[in-house]
Amino acid sequence: MDNEIIVGLDIGTTKIACFVGMRTENRKVKILGFGKTESVGVENGVVKSITGTADSITKAVEEASEQSGVIIDEVWVGIAGQHIKSNPSHGSIMVPSDHTLIEQEDVDRLIDEQYNIQLPPGEEIIHVFAQQYYVDREPLNREIPPVGVAGKNLEADFHMVTANVQNLQYIKYAVQRAGLKIKGVVLEPIASAKAVLDDSDRDAGVAMVDIGGGTTDIAVFYDGIIRHTSVLPLAGNAITNDIREGCNILKKQAENLKVKFGSCLVQAVSENDVISIPGIRSQSSREIYVKTLAGIINARTKMIMEQVGYEIKLSGYSNKLIAGVVLTGGGAQLKNIKDLCELITTTDTRIGIPNEHLDPESFSFAELAHPMYATGIGLVLYGLEQAESEREHGGNEEEEPENIHTKDGHVDMFANMAETTAEPQKPAEENDNAKKDKSKGFEKVLGRFFNSVFNEGIDD
């Protein structure tokens, strides 16, 4: 379906947002509608209260459905949280003697075998990204895919992303309780990168840093390939809590101060500017120096940026990031955060806004062109690319998409769920009975997502 409609669901610590979008003729993404509500039951990117989160999801989805005129029954979901881990791995297989050349099934078998790697108890692989292929011990140039090369031994270096099984289950239960099916789960920095980066960024080398409410997500790209991922448990909420405790005010007041008057650099604010904070009930108002506020914000933001810098160095690509650092997420709206990032990481920095891939006729275009919506819009982009990849490779609704690998025998939290594939999203008037199907079996789709260097699901 050329006009297939995709729904992205961003389950964040401070907000839950739902985006309904489709591809336009100019290859942009048109957002047909979106809904946003306060996130209840999510802490540092992890679902704690299934009921509370489900209720928030329902509100956001209902708003997006009403605006777009689309009945929503399946979603692409972003995942983050401190439980996310990334590790390198190396795989090797012998090519069957009856294969004169390496075939696609050989590459698939090599990737499948990565899911047999022994993991710590309670961890599940969610992404496997190929970094470098080798044929008969010789590395292949990135422009040369292994399929069609003559050789008897096929190897590859991989970047693996794992998540806590229980936390994955909680996401699944919350989405299911909201009457929805999960089409796929995507690491949030990968989704955000879809919205704010282009091919030239990824080829040149770039670190994408998404500063949300509960977590700061990092993805490092070089030579068109994702090289490193990390999720830090510090973000915007930590800054707000510091202001609340340091100024002895309400959390809502602290958040307003951060957004309206906050600065990441003490030297960038006036020495004598004062903010008046209304007192509670009969209490008199309080005065807070803007410089004091900036000092509190600077201390925490500096700590976050130091950890970001450490992760970039840990990736091994700190000296190769020609495109620098791209900051996005709600935290990227803090005044002078770009300057602080450059001071700490000694790397050129810009703010990533998800408007490059948006069609100007999108619903509330001006509002959506904001860093805080990068993940949600990126999820729509990711889902569209997966759907296009399926069509390109002749997939159909009965077959498993090429980029989703489910390894037989591997622990799968959805093993007892019905293996049904939902119909594409349709306008409400074309799908009056769709809501009746919401209680049916939940799709077994938290499988294994991988994107090879040569079939780049994240670099298209």
Image (cartoon, helix red, strand yellow):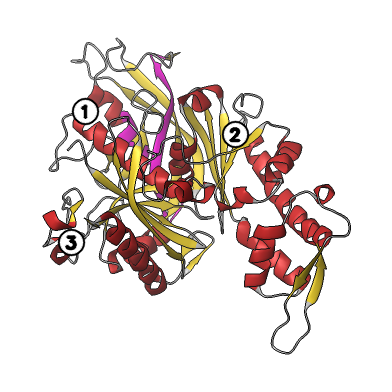
Residue 40 image point, x, y percent? 46, 70
Q: Earlier in the sequence, mark 3 or mark 2?
A: 2
- Is 248 in the magenta? no
Residue 209 image point, x, y percent? 58, 42
Q: Report the Cα–Cα distance between label 3 and label 2.
A: 41 Å
**Front residue of this view, candidates 199 and 234:** 199
Q: Relative to 431, is 191 on the left or the right?
A: right
Residue picked out by circle 2:
315
Q: Nearer the viewer, mark 3 or mark 2?
A: 3
Q: Relative to 353, is 105 on the left or the right?
A: left
Q: Earlier in the sequence, mark 3 or mark 1?
A: 1
Residue picked out by circle 1:
392
- Kindly identify the amino acid type of the residue bearing the numbered disc 3: Gly
Dot 3 falls on a residue whose secondary structure is: loop
- Kindly identify the amino acid type of the residue bearing the numbered disc 2: Ser
Residue drawn where x is 23% and y is 58% of the image:
73
Residue 39 image point, x, y percent? 46, 66
Q: Report the Cα–Cα distance between label 3 and label 1.
A: 28 Å
Tell me whether the residue at label 3 lies in contact with that at label 1, contact meaning CB atoms closer than 8 angstroms: no
Span colored in magenta: 110-137
Q: Report the Cα–Cα distance between label 1 and label 2.
A: 33 Å
Quadrant of residue 207 in the image? top right
> On screen, 346 above or below 248?
above
Q: Nearer the viewer, mark 1 or mark 2?
A: 1
Q: Which quadrant: the C terminus? A: top left
- Is 135 in the magenta? yes
Q: Which mark is residue 441?
A: 3
Dot 1 falls on a residue whose secondary structure is: helix
Tell me whether the residue at label 3 lies in contact with that at label 2, contact meaning CB atoms closer than 8 angstroms: no
